[in-house]
């Protein structure tokens, strides 16, 4: 069977672990709030209205791509492109090419950062593999101006971070929504996770600080994984109404 992502790929391992996915979400939630195209998220209303629901829907699409054979993965990518085209038609505007690239760049960067935070340092070949998977997603979506290699992506990633982010009124409102939907304790955990995973430029704009208090919790969490009790901590971190989705975060393994 011809899969979109090889069975032995590091990308399947990254996206097959719930804790890694939670850190990917933490980083992306920070960067989405800063992105100069964040007004598109407010046009649809989905992210500010239900940040956690948006997380699980994003995970579902990503896994359709990462864990499916080629035709099914391509159909999932085509559905994503069609959804965005529909939003553009409703608004009568086109989402900027750089905004599409930013989303792919986030998925590449936070996949690497989250895995390295929780597991180990990736090899250059593994990082290139992560890049290749999301590069092919971008090609299938018809995006223009994509970097042609991991090395080129590293340069463009820095440029995008410098050019496409700002702390705006949308940023402040989105963080209010995060706090509203997560509650005080979970919101503080989100901020601590962001300190651990986001690039320097993102931290600087959000003024998150540089002394993460979550490090001791990570030590406990890693021990809980060894004892197969990490789902308990996930249940504490995420609201009870998402219990089924929490359980499913670890369904797919490499």
Image (cartoon, grey):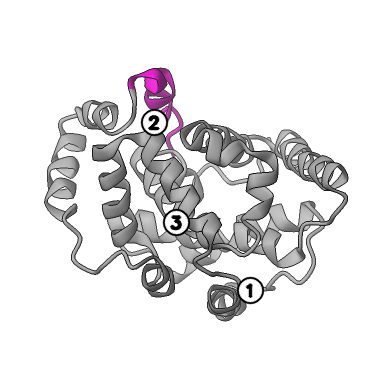
Residue 250, disc:
2
Instruction: Give 36 or 79, whichever is nearer the viewer.
Output: 36
Of the two numbered discs 3 and 1 on the same chain, state the one appearing first in sequence: 3
**Which quadrant holds the N terminus?**
top right
- Label 1 packing within 10 angstroms: few (<14), some (14-19), many (20+): few
x and y, in percent, of residue 249 in the image: 42, 31
Q: Is residue 242 magenta?
A: yes
Q: Give above or below for 219 relative to 65.
A: below
Q: From the viewer's perspective, is the residue at label 2 or at label 3 nearer?
A: 3
Q: What residue is rendered at 64% in x and 47% in y?
A: 41
Instruction: Give 27 or 163, whichever is nearer the viewer.
Output: 163
The answer, for residue 13, to whether it is visible in the render is no
The residues bearing labels 2 and 3 have C-alpha atoms spaced at a distance of 23 Å
Is residue 86 left or right of 49 when viewed as pictured? right
Residue hosting label 3: 30
Of the two numbered discs 2 and 1 on the same chain, state the one appearing first in sequence: 1
The answer, for residue 200, to whether it is visible in the render is yes
**Which quadrant holds the C terminus?**
top left
- Determine whether the residue tagged by mark 1 lies in a helix, strand or loop: loop
Residue hosting label 1: 149
Determine the residue located farthest toward the front in the rendered image: 169
Is residue 196 left or right of 132 when viewed as pictured? left
Q: Is residue 221 magenta?
A: no
Instruction: Give 155 or 94, whichever is nearer the viewer.
Output: 94
Q: Look at the image and give the residue range highlighted in magenta.
A: 240-254
């Amino acid at each position: 069977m011809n899969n979109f992502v090889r069975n032995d790929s590091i990308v399947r391992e990254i996206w097959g672990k719930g804790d890694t996915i939670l850190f990917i979400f933490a980083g992306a939630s920070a960067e989405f709030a800063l992105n100069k195209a964040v007004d598109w998220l407010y046009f649809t209303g989905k992210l500010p209205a239900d940040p956690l629901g948006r997380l699980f829907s994003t995970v579902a699409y990503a896994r359709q791509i990462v864990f499916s054979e080629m035709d099914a993965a391509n159909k999932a990518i085509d559905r994503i492109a069609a959804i965005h085209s529909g939003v553009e038609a409703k608004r009568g505007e086109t989402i900027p090419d750089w905004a599409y690239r930013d989303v792919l760049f986030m998925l590449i960067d936070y996949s690497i950062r989250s895995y390295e935070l929780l597991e180990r340092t990736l090899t250059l070949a593994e990082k290139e593999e992560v890049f290749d998977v999301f590069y092919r997603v971008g090609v299938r979506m018809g995006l223009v101006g994509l970097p042609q290699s991991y090395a080129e992506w590293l340069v463009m990633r820095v440029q995008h971070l410098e050019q496409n982010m700002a702390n705006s009124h949308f940023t402040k409102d989105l963080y209010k929504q995060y706090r509203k939907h997560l509650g005080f304790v979970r919101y503080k955990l989100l901020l601590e996770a962001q300190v651990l995973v986001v690039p320097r430029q993102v931290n600087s704009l959000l003024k998150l600080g540089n002394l993460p208090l979550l490090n001791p919790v990570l030590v406990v969490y890693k021990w809980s994984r060894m004892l197969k009790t990490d789902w308990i901590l996930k249940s504490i971190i995420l609201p009870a109404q998402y219990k089924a989705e929490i359980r499913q975060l670890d369904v797919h393994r490499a």
